[in-house]
Image (tube, rainbow, N blue to C red):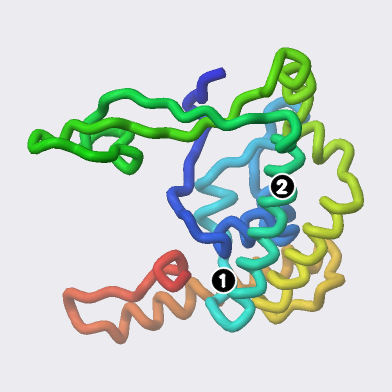
Amino acid sequence: MFPDQQLYAFARDDDYFFGVLHSRFHEVWALKLGTRLETRPRYTPTTCFETFSFPQPNEQKIDISTAAKELNELRENWLNPPEWTTTRILEFPSATDGPWSRFVVDPDARGIGTVRYARGEARDDDCAKKLAKRTLTNLYNERPAWLANAHTKLDRAVAHAYDFPVDLSDERILERLLALNQQRIVDEKTATKKQPRGSRAKTDEEFV
């Protein structure tokens, strides 16, 4: 399966960013502001992501990162159970300025070295058949208790970061996020007016 033009990647490697985007707050915002493909919701970055106000970094950032890392590890373990998988080291030549640069070892004077990449694979054909059914869609359709609990923990940490009550309804979440969005716009315009010529106010993403 290959990605098409509808795939968007957010190039971040921190658990905090992952956690906020996987929280109920971003989900509610995205479902409201996203578009529809027939009856299915469609995530559109211009309306769902670019308009979304992240909480300002504070002491809750660590709690969000911890909860997000736990959620990701639980999901990965369900998707690829260690008893069904094995790791094979792939080796092939590549350059330090190529797409596999971070896996290149022992490069020569020309920057050519050997890629050593650990890839998870099914242990056998029977495991491969079982792994084919382990998808995020199937997981969230089943929504086992451990997954619900992990999301509850993450949502609680994100709510505290916003200084929101943890039991807000979807409507109240939208109201508060909209108010925050509008206040950020006012604050940015005010800060821009105060900036010396040639400088600018930071965006929300630069504060994250």
For image coordinates 33% across by 34% down, the residue present is 100
Mark 2: secondary structure:
helix
Residue 47 against residue 79 in the figure, above or below: below
From this view, report whether residue 208 is shown above or below residue 25: below
Three-letter amino acid code at the position of disc 2: Leu
Place of residue 45 in the rendered image (x, y in percent of width and height, measured from the top left): 53, 45
Return the x and y of residue 128 as percentages of the image width and height: 71, 19
Which percent across, then down, holds residue 85? 67, 30
Q: Which residue is mark 2?
A: 31
Residue 170 occupies quadrant: bottom right
Residue drawn 31% across and 81% down? Answer: 193
Q: Residue at label 1?
A: 182
* C-alpha distance separating marks 2 and 1: 19 Å
Residue reaching furthest to the bottom: 194
Image quadrant in which you'd find residue 149: bottom right
Tell me if residue 77 comes above or below residue 172 in the rendering.
above
